[in-house]
Image: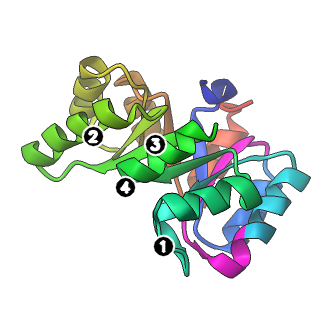
Amino acid sequence: MNFNGQSLIPVSKNMCQYDLFLKSGFEYGVYLDTDLIHLKPISELAKEYNKKLIIHTDMIQGLKNDEYSIEYICQDIKPFGIISTRPSVLAKAKKRGLLTIQRVFLLDSQALKKSYEIAQKTQADYLEILPGILPDFIRKISNDIDIPVLTGGLVTTREEVNCALRAGAQAVTTSNVALWKAVERLRIVT
């Protein structure tokens, strides 16, 4: 799985951003923060526009982020994939055939060590590291583990996107709409 050459993955934090994503040339996108009431309509819109939606399950208001909620998401919402920090949620989603992305925050060396341990345990499809502006760590993590790396957070320029990609990231996630448009204009994504 390589996102069909899509090097930037739009992250929608609200319906205005989501509408821009739906009308864009991007195939893959993330919905970051929603509630239980809007989850199904968001998913249905993605299908209507032939988009592959990845939902950040840790940030769904009104739904506890556990194995039961993932069962509901798999059966009723049917996204293309999920992002989570929770190993049990990732394991259940992977078992049910969803693309899984383990999100980790690089706070310090202890957090990095713990992230490696969790990554080996969950065997998520991707490891998303935040912040995304640390090319030396992107390179190190890409070399240290057998799981492809995504990165995001604090990425604001095309140069930062390109730097993350050169360091080993498979793609960069961002909610910066200006950056989506700049990348789309340059046809970095197809």
Q: Is residue 132 above or below residue 71?
A: above
The amino acid marked with disc number 1 is Lys
Find residue 140 and report its horizontal and vertical position in percent: 22, 25
Question: Real-space Cα distance between discs 3 and 4?
Answer: 28 Å
Question: Real-space Cα distance between discs 1 and 2?
Answer: 21 Å
The amino acid marked with disc number 4 is Leu
Figure quadrant of residue 39: bottom right
The amino acid marked with disc number 3 is Ala
The residue segment tinted magenta is 25-39
Residue placed under numbered mark 4 in the picture: 154
Residue placed under numbered mark 1 in the picture: 64
Label 2: few (<14), some or many (≥20) within 10 Å? Answer: some
Residue placed under numbered mark 3 in the picture: 91
Contact, CB < 8 Å: mark 3 with mark 2? Answer: no
The mark that comes first in sequence, 3 or 4, is 3
The mark that comes first in sequence, 3 or 2, is 3
Residue 34 falls inside the magenta stretch: yes
**Of the two numbered discs 3 and 2 in the rendering, the one whose residue sits closer to the viewer:** 3
Contact, CB < 8 Å: mark 1 with mark 2? Answer: no
Q: Is residue 86 above or below residue 8?
A: below
Q: Which mark is residue 118?
A: 2
